[in-house]
Amino acid sequence: MQRKRLFPSRASLVLVLCQVITALEVPLDLQDKLPQPPTITQQSPKNYIVDPRENIVIRCEAKGKPPPSFTWTRNGTHFDTEKDPLVTMKPNSGTLEINIMNGGKAETYEGEYQCTAKNDRGTAVSNVIFIRQSRSPLWTKEKIEPIVIQQGMPLVLPCKPPKGLPPPIIFWMDNFFQRLPQNGRISQGLNGDLYFSNVQPEDTRDFYICYARFNLTQTIHQKQPISLKVLTMDAMNESIAANLTETDFYGDSPVDNRPPTFLMPSGHTSNKTVLKDEVLLLECIAEGLPTPEIRWNKEGAELPSNRVFYENFNKTLKIIGVSEADAGRYRCTAQNNRGSIHHVTTVIVKAAPYWITKPENLVLSPGDDGTLICRAHGNPAPTITWLINGVAVELAPNDPSRVVDGDTVIFTRVHEQASAVFQCNASNIYGYVLANAFVNVLAERPRILSSQKVYQVIANRPALLHCKSFGSPVPNIEWFKGVQSSVLHGNDYTFHNNGTLEVPVAQKDSSGTYTCVARNKLGTDQKIIKLEVKDPTMIISQPEYRVVQRYGSASFQCKFKHDPTLAAEVMWLRNNSELPMDERYTFEKERLTIKNITEKDKGTYTCMANTTLDSASASAELNVVDRPDPPFDLELTDRLDRSVQLSWVPGDDNNSPITEFIIEYEDAIHQPGVWHVHSKVSGTQATATLTLSPFVNYSFRVIAVNEIGYSDHSESSERYMTKVAEPDTNPSGIRGLGSEPDNLVITWKPMKGFDSNGPGLQYKVSWRQKDVDEDWTSVTVANVSKYIVSGTPTFVPYEIKVQALNDLGYAPEPAVVIGHSGEDLPMAAPDNVEVEVINTTLAKVRWDPVLLMSVRGHLHGYRVYYWKAQNITNRNRRHIEKWMLPFNGNKTHGMLPGLQPNTNYFLNVRVVNGKGEGPSSKDKYFETPEGVPSVAFLHISHRTPDSLTLTWSPPAHPNGVLTQYTLKYQSINATHELSPPVEITILPNETSYILANLVQNTRYKFYFYAHTAVGPGSQSTQEAITAMDEAMASRQVDIATQGWFIGLMCAVALLILVLLIVCFIRRNKGGKYPVKEKEDAHADPEIQPMKEDDGTFGEYSDAEDHKPLKKGSRTPSDRTVKKEDSDDSLVDYGEGVNGQFNEDGSFIGQYSGKKEKEPVEGNESSEAPSPVNAMNSFV
């Protein structure tokens, strides 16, 4: 907003706020400080009924400045309370207490009382209070004769309670103080009488007692009991037979049914007058036989439904809060099966005076104008009377500044002496209302009442600086910014009549000090106010929409920023209400987490960031989903032989739309208790037409599906039994295979009872030989799954069919299936078997196929059996190990893997069908060439200071003729370096060797392998330490037992431990260290292979690479031998699993090579040699 500068700078022109008010409003906090005429604040009710057992307290309280004094009148004359010792007036109050407990009588003080409160500004008067003593008189003595009455007649038991003040509450009881039961036939009227529409024998009672309860005096009085005897016609005649003539007897028939007549009120019409705002009670009690029913209505209008009540079994119409609109004609109708009667009550609504405009206190400044208005209404119209200070206007002193004009008093240019209390009395024949209203003329200098000194407001919002003031005359208000600056004016500010300064859009530069000045002709007051403009609170990260499955959890995050000088807090709401106290809700900074969510947690979650000045909010929806509730109300319609319509009502989808319905059925005849899926339909459907099968007792249920999961199944539908019919289908899975060479076994998959379509399910089995001109042979069998045809030729094709039938007929013609009669063992063996040796472990075998006619069955394939030729060592064995390799189908060649080198073998071939194997071919001999030997394990059997004795066993598999052994060895020094290798050749028949001229107490590493003509075999490695000289050992022992040596060793061990920790840390960080570099440079020769050509050491290599062995390399040995596998797998060549067979061809097991590993003697520690280690090696 742009400011307009209307005046020159530093001008002291003032923009004044003018308040044009005809009446001053005195603030509450000043009312007790300013002069004020009396005001009645509390008084007793107009009609005051007192308890004669208690003191009488007549209340009259008033306020004013100065405090008023009180006087009383009684029955229109002055009541001198000081002269009556039983009457006291409370201090600083007009309340009277009459002490009748000390000998006084309440009736002495009955009458009309009025209180007057007076100070120098006027006089106020109370209502006229009518004091009456409560009365609870007794019933007058009377003699009540027993009542004997004929059954069915009407009856009224009078109560006639005594007139009490206030009127008593009436009720009827028996002699056991139990209330008498009331109903539509028996009821109590408003006057207290007990009405019987018709008496019955069960009404006979000796004690009908009417009670009157006077609540104010807390007393209950009772009437003399009334005895009632109801006689039937027979009992009535017997009781009076002795005293009456024959013509006096009642008839022998009961009282006839009769139409209603009214017991209350009498006549056809009546009038009822009721006052406005009171309760209207209309009563109609009718007699008749049978008991009449009562109905109410208003002619030409509806009864007010919100204010009308029907009581006393519809016999009383009650309307509360009566208004002029309730006047009119009310009709009550009594009706039974013999007729009806009605009564019309004309209701007239009158009204005691009530206020339309009640006069209100008027505060004026000298010279002001004002009015007092007193308007009341009533029926008849009330009379308005004015009094001044409790005196009629005509008798009050004359004042030219006031004029009384009917219900209005007009004041013009009042003066300070015009203060007074005016009474307005509105009265008619039904009562009066009285109101006090004072006119208070004040002359007061200005006072600024606003106490707030600092106002804080959010930027870009209006700022309201209040300057509430009081003065008489009303002061003018002006505003300044700063301590001594110009008066504020222009469009940048809004000035309100109550003195408030408004800054429409507060900015940061609006902050500062403002001064409010209030002036009138009696003086000036001012107040300095500070305005602070703060930054607004803003949500910078809003919570997001969440979809959570029931019993899951969800989190909402809400980040905000605010003015740093203001305290802030976050509050979370759900659906605009505070979150309940629940441990499932957790709050962490700006995050709300809800655990174990249920349906009641669904709704809108609002994050409210609150400061003392403003708040910001953001909301997000939480949608709780779950699998649907089960469908319900399943119904079957449109029932036909092969279909029915199923309908259902979907359950609650739990906020995730239903995608489909699964319909399941149960067959109570064939599979009771087992449910099957019938069909699936869209989630938008609630009906489905279902295809049915005959002879099924159906029951259906439905499952709803949504993205969350499956609902529980619905309740089962009613059952529906379909009619029987011929089978619709034939059995499946028909096969024809022979179990013997001369039979045909026909099998099929039996049909389920569900598919039988009726009782008596059977099968018609038919067969004939294929390609032979002959008729079908058929047989009908029970519900089985196979039939055997005997006496068939061996392995010939047959045409087969199986047809279902039940008690109603046959299924459609079945399809024909081709089968074969039983197989027999093949008759011929394969010819021209040839073997080609590929290498030391692999051979290829070929054969000619046999003729299909000789197979006599389905050709499954061929089997190759092979075994080692017997030699002198195994010729006497009773069991020959054989292997079998199958080849499926019509193959005529195959590979034999996994053979042993330098071995003589035999093999033969057999053809195989479904029955078994045929005769074998002639045995075929072949030999495998020589290979390299397997490992020869090396052992250290004895050691001295300068020699080691080495022993070994020949290779388990020499795979040829051994030609020599090769031994290589190297010494290992203290730094783990290896010496140049030394090689020794040993004859093949040797099994030990003594290695002499060695260095004592030195570690050696050995490499050992055998040779054939083909080359070296697998290598065996071993390590050993030569023995120590006895003298050196004794010295070593002596040193080892010295304390200084033990301490030195401990220090060395500690240092090594520290180095290991450092190395471990560096290794984890990826860095290298000297030991690592040595290991990279010198690898373990134990795993290095020999060169194929010259048998020397190769270089260091990993598992695949072969590099020369470097001098001085050293790594610890793991005493393992790596076998170089060269065997070919049988799986790579044959179609079956390898097997071993006995001489009779039975299966033994799969061939596998044997691995031998024996323990190696000697110390294999990788540590550097030491005297202690050398000694320990001999232990």
Image (spheres, helix red, strand yellow):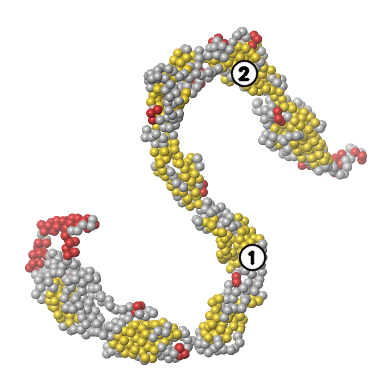
Q: Quadrant of the C terminus?
A: bottom left
Please rate how many residues cluster around mark 1, counting C-alpha atoms within 10 Å: few if below 14, some from 14 to 19, many from 20.
Answer: some
Image coordinates for residue 773, horizontal then vertical, percent = 58, 89
Quick check: 835 above or below 150? below
Q: Amino acid at mark 2?
A: Ile
Tell me what residue is drawn at x 27 percent, y 88 percent: 873
Is residue 345 positioned above or below 1096 on the image?
above
Q: Nearer the viewer, residue 732 or 814?
A: 814
- Residue 785 lies left or right of residue 963; in this view the side is right
Which structural element holds mark 1?
Answer: strand
Instruction: Give the residue at mark 1.
Output: 643
- Answer whether residue 49 is visible to the viewer in this image: no
Mark 2 or mark 1: which comes first in sequence?
Answer: 2
Q: Which residue is mark 2?
A: 373
Which label is found at residue 249? none
Q: Is residue 560 visible?
A: yes
Amino acid of disc 1: Ser
Place residue 643 in its image quadrant: bottom right
* Quadrant of image for the N terminus: top left
Q: Position of residue 249 (x, y in %)?
A: 89, 40
- Count how many numbered circles sit on residues in the image: 2
Of residue 137 and residue 711, the one placed in the foreground of this image is 711
Looking at the picture, tell me which residue is in the foreground, 942 or 901.
901
Residue appearing at x 17%, y 66% in the figure: 1082
